Image (tube, helix red, strand yellow):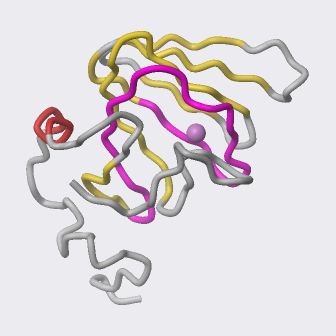
Amino acid sequence: MSPTANPTATPAAPAARGQSQTIDLADKIRRIEGHWQPRVVAEMNDYQFKVVKVLGDFPWHRHAETDETFLVLDGELRIEHRASPHDEPSVIVLRAGQMAVVPQGVEHRPSAEHEVKMLLIEPRGVVNTGDGAKGERTVANDQWV
Ligand code: NI
């Protein structure tokens, strides 16, 4: 593959893919309407950096194929997680400047009592609501801001 080839990017992706430039995450988030609407700000190899603001509970879901990183920029995020639906969930609490990696295959449910702004790091093509049926929270991939 040539250094400029990027076969899986959609036309919405800027040619520079967010590289070699300063990216102001707070500014990007201000341009997003609504909650649970992740938007790509940059790519690194096959990974995407997505900003999102969230409020309330997200559905339980899992990603069989990938880990998922949450980096909180503002607010307090709770991530319940469990190895299987029969297990008692554990909880991770993340505040501004804190991050966590949810391992692949682990069921998780992010929630925010008050609005949270965060950065997600995950491979291109990951469905935000995880494996299985899509729901009302499912968002199209590769939407840049
Ligand atoms: Ni997830």
Q: Which residues are magenta?
A: 45-70
The residue lying at 46 percent from left, 52 percent from top is 139
The residue lying at 33 percent from left, 37 percent from top is 52
| Quadrant in the picture for residue 92 | top right
The residue lying at 24 percent from left, 66 percent from top is 17
The residue lying at 43 percent from left, 44 percent from top is 121
Q: Residue furthest front?
A: 136
Looking at the image, residue 87 lies above or below residue 106? above
* Residue 120 as seen in the image, left or right of residue 126: left
Q: Name the residue nearer the viewer: 4 or 8.
A: 8
Q: Position of residue 7 (x, y in %)?
A: 41, 84
* Residue 118 as seen in the image, left or right of residue 145: right
Q: Is residue 55 magenta?
A: yes
Q: Name the residue nearer the viewer: 95 or 46.
A: 95
Q: Position of residue 115 (x, y in %)?
A: 33, 18
The quadrant of the image that shows the C terminus is: bottom left
* Residue 141 as seen in the image, left or right of residue 126: left
The quadrant of the image that shows the N terminus is: bottom left
| Quadrant in the picture for residue 10 | bottom left
Looking at the image, residue 103 lies above or below residue 54? below
Ligand 1's quadrant: top right
Q: What is the count of numbered marks?
A: 0
Q: Is residue 28 magenta?
A: no
